Amino acid sequence: MKLSIIVATSQNNVIGKDNQLIWRLSADLKRFKALTTGHHIIMGRKTFDSIGKPLPNRTSIVITRQADYKVEGCIVVNSLEEALEKVPADQEAFIIGGGTIYKEAIEKADKLYLTRVQNKFDGDTFFPKIDFKIWNSVKREDHMPSEKNEYAYSFIDYVRK
């Protein structure tokens, strides 16, 4: 199994505030959908709650410490290890948040799909600092603000060295 992380962060590594995204970038949402459709997506319960439903054409795995937590249309597990066991060996799975799950998964991930929003934001949830001794940038696309994308942003793909 290939484990990938997909995340949008600000320049100061903020990924959210009050369990919500701070920005809306149409291009980032399209990229997220294109990359994750047909795959397993792994998230924490708070991330799932912020989305509110299983995403179409993906297998949603929700990690929670709540023993009795159940949600229709999702696989519910109690650890990242248990989540990874649910993914077929020949597939790519995507970690989609939140902060605690990202911190745990970055040690295990093979690839990182980063959208860097070229702005600083106040937030309460952060992505771990990327260690460039471990991660190698293999692709980068820079974009200016537009009608559907309020901020400048970059798509940067990393692979573990």
Image (spheres, rainbow, N blue to C red):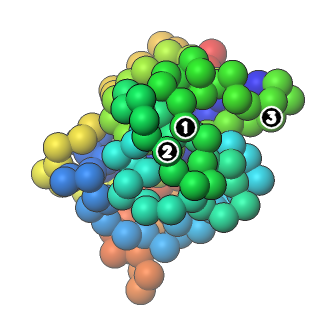
First in sequence, mark 2 or 1: give its number: 2
Residue receiving disc 1:
76
* Location of residue 23 (image quadrant): bottom left
Q: Nearer the viewer, mark 3 or mark 1?
A: 1
Three-letter residue code for mark 2: Lys
First in sequence, mark 2 or 3: give its number: 2
Q: Is residue 49 above or below residue 93?
A: below
Three-letter residue code for mark 3: Gln
Q: Nearer the viewer, mark 2 or mark 1?
A: 2
Residue receiving disc 3:
91
Residue 47 x %, y %: 39, 48
Relative side of 80 to 144, left or right: right
- Specify the label residue 48 is tagged with: none
| Disc 1 secondary structure class | strand
Q: Residue furthest left?
A: 122
Q: Residue furthest right?
A: 90
Asked whether residue 82 is in view, the answer is yes
Structural distance between the alpha carbons of marks 3 and 1: 19 Å
Structural distance between the alpha carbons of marks 2 and 3: 25 Å
* Location of residue 128 (image quadrant): top left
